[in-house]
Image (tube, rainbow, N blue to C red):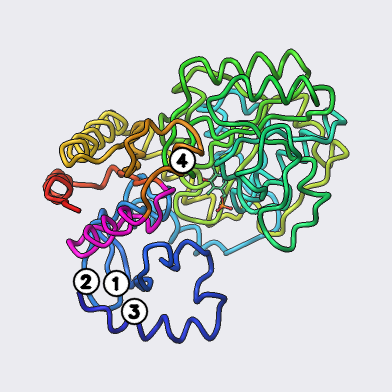
Amino acid sequence: MNTKRSEELYKKALTLMPGGVNSPVRACRNVGRTPLFIDHARGDKIYDADGSEFIDYVCSWGPNILGHAHPRVVDAVKNAVESGLTFGACHEGEIVLAETIKRHFPSMELVRLVNSGTEAVMSAVRVARGFTGRSRILKFEGCYHGHSDGLLVKAGSGLLTNAAPDSAGVVRSSAESTLLASYNNEDSVSQVFEKYGGDIAAVIIEPCAANMGVVPPKKGFLQFLRNITKEYGALLIFDEVITGFRLSIGGAQQYYGIKPDLTTLGKIVGGGMPLAAYGGRHDIMECVSPIGSVYQAGTLSGNPVAVSAGVETIRIIEESTDLYTVLEERSALIEASMRKAGINVNRVGSIITPFFTKKVVSDYDTALSSDTNAFAWYYSYMLENGIYTAPSQFEAMFVSYAHTDESIEYTCRTIENFKR
Ligand SMILES: *Cc1c(COP(=O)(O)O)cnc(C)c1O
């Protein structure tokens, strides 16, 4: 593999940005490689600065459900750009996107548009605290909710212990109000509620976890969370930044049939542009400024160019009659190939993670049992065979509507030939 130009660029980037990157996982340090610099991308392919072509299963970490640079989305963005890049004022596109979101996520009775998943979650948590007048948040080990202070907590902390910050620069006090439980473990949740129940503003969860690798919720687990939060007067927040418009057009809440109080969306909802959203029950969202006392604002929130990409992307999803069936079929083929190659795998719809462990991966501890050296080996094998996947064991492989039968077939064959 020729990576000369990427290496040159990386060397230069190292002098300008911490680790040479604008988001840490791009650095490929986990897999002992230097990152590829991308020149352009189209459909299911991504092309690096040295002219190599790859079949892309990173899909920008989730947004590209239609593949790269879908012509209709690109046209919508071009048209929007012609009318002005940002107004800092109301425009009709915001209404169209909010209506679109609400149509598919009926639990989101009122919606706010923001700029990143981090911002959406941070705001939803503030609203939950403002609405309930309580301070604590319960999250699950191994779930990622963006990089706001209170949610960056050591995922290895024991149950019932107040979380220690997982990052330098986060003061203990802002992590202390975050409580931890184990994913798929009802007892761990009950114990936290017994001790802190009256002070828990919200339980936040990835309704299908995808940031410790894909870990689906066990049957009944989300319903259990719905019941216990109701019992204690806490809110249930679904962080659907990955699962929204991914597991189904109505996200995980439609897929699993559970209605949360608040929902956060990101990634697909912005169609590849920096846009995210949060929303939920009318009475809760009425706490948000200017009608309520929870402050949240944004110079570029509801940006017309970003909104145009989101609206057009969802419109294409709505118009397609077979998108989720096709994603399911193609993803099932990849899962089957992994099993043939003796790789353990978790898959829900079009998100897939290969695990290098004999254990059933159902929570953070079992995810951590995966052999990351074996993963690094697999990663390099795939890359050198022209298949671009996330350079970390604890991420998902994303299948898009743009992946052709030919690409899927080639991917399956390559996986089946993998030997350690
Ligand atoms: C990506 C992600 C976020 C953070 O979104 P950003 O746009 O990267 O800030 C939050 N929650 C989940 C579940 C995510 O996957």
Q: Is mark 4 within 8 Å of ligand 1?
A: yes
Give, as a three-letter code, the residue at label 2. Answer: Ser
* Residue annotated with mark 3: 6
Q: Are marks 3 and 2 in contact (CB under 8 Å)?
A: no
Residue 278 spot, x, y in % from top left? 64, 39
Residue 384 on the magenta span: yes
- Mark nearest the camera among 2 and 4 is 4
Q: Secondary structure at mark 4?
A: loop
* Residue annotated with mark 2: 52
- When the figure is inspected, residue 188 is found, relative to residue 64, above or below; the finding is above
* Residue annotated with mark 4: 210
Q: Earlier in the sequence, mark 1 or mark 4?
A: 1
Q: Is residue 71 at all visible to an observer of this figure?
A: no
- Mark nearest the camera among 1 and 4 is 4
- When the figure is inspected, residue 252 is found, relative to residue 371, above or below; the finding is above
- Tell me the magenta residue range: 373-395
Residue 395 spot, x, y in % from top left? 42, 48
Whole-angstrom CA distance, mark 2 to mark 1, is: 6 Å
Whole-angstrom CA distance, mark 3 to mark 4, is: 29 Å
Q: Are marks 2 and 1 in contact (CB under 8 Å)?
A: yes
- When the figure is inspected, residue 108 is found, relative to residue 151, above or below; the finding is above
Q: Quadrant of residue 233?
A: top right
Give, as a three-letter code, the residue at label 4. Answer: Ala
Q: Earlier in the sequence, mark 2 or mark 4?
A: 2
- When the figure is inspected, residue 16 is found, relative to residue 254, above or below; the finding is below
Along the line of sight, the residue nearer the viewer: 323 or 89: 323
* Residue annotated with mark 1: 48
